[in-house]
């Protein structure tokens, strides 16, 4: 299955909903829930999508092998983390936490695993050099931004 394409399409749809004012997130979980909703519309199989704040990742597309957190194996799936920057004053803290997410994402799964970090800010507060630094921080993780 093409989980990366499903994720990109859902992310682009979410960004359009934010841009047009049809979706206004107030916290990170709002974004995760909306992405779950958008992805499942394409996947059509609830066994292939997982969201939880107590797991390793915010969203997983694909099958997860292993029941307990330390036993979980990720293969042929997509792992995603989200960050939401509601206020400009929280930007630096969220970007630092993003680096931790990048490390976590980069170390999980096998070569078939896709890894995504999606950062949604309420306004255009992230500077181009900050974006570039995050994109280059871990080469095996795709980083997306809105706006």
Image (cartoon, grey):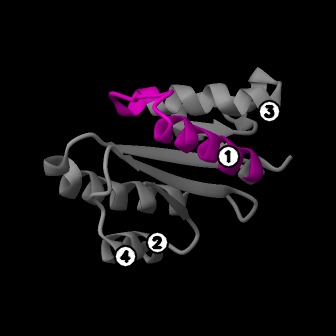
Q: Mark 1 or mark 3, which has the lower sequence index?
A: 1
Is label 4 in a helix, a strand or a loop?
A: helix
What stretch of residues is rendered in magenta? 5-30
Indicate the position of residue 109 as horizontal and vertical percent values: 64, 55
In the displayed structure, would residue 127 be above or below residue 83? below
Numbered label attached to residue 133: 4
Q: Residue at x 70, y 33 (%)?
A: 39
Indicate the position of residue 122 as horizontal and vertical percent values: 32, 43
- Which secondary structure is most common in the magenta stretch? helix
- Locate residue 32 relative to residue 124 in the image: left or right: right
Numbered label attached to residue 7: 1
Q: Residue at x 80, y 32 (%)?
A: 43
Q: Is residue 56 visible?
A: no
Q: Spatial distance from mark 1 to mark 2, Cα to Cα?
A: 17 Å
Outermost residue, left direction? 89
Outermost residue, front direction? 20
CB under 8 Å between discs 1 and 3: no
Is label 2 in a helix, a strand or a loop?
A: helix
Q: Nearer the viewer, residue 114 or 10?
A: 10
Q: Residue at x 20, y 43 (%)?
A: 87
Q: Is residue 78 visible?
A: yes
Numbered label attached to residue 42: 3
Is label 3 in a helix, a strand or a loop?
A: helix
Q: Nearer the viewer, residue 89 or 123?
A: 123
In the displayed structure, would residue 120 be above or below residue 38? below
Q: Spatial distance from mark 4 to mark 3, Cα to Cα?
A: 32 Å
Q: Mark 1 or mark 4, which has the lower sequence index?
A: 1
């Amino acid at each position: 299955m093409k989980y990366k394409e499903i994720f990109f399409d859902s992310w682009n749809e979410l960004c359009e909903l934010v841009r047009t004012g049809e979706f206004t997130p107030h916290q990170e979980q709002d974004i995760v829930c909306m992405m779950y909703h958008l992805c499942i519309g394409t996947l059509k199989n609830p066994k292939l999508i997982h969201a939880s704040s107590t797991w390793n990742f915010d969203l997983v597309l694909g099958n997860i092998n292993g029941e307990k957190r330390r036993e979980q194996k990720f293969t042929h799936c997509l792992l995603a983390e989200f960050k939401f920057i509601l206020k400009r004053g929280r930007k630096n803290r969220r970007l630092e936490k993003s680096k931790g997410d990048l490390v976590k994402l980069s170390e999980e799964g096998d070569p078939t695993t896709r890894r995504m970090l999606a950062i949604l800010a309420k306004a255009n507060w992230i500077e181009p050099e900050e974006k570039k630094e995050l994109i280059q921080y871990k080469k095996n993780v795709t980083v997306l931004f809105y706006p």
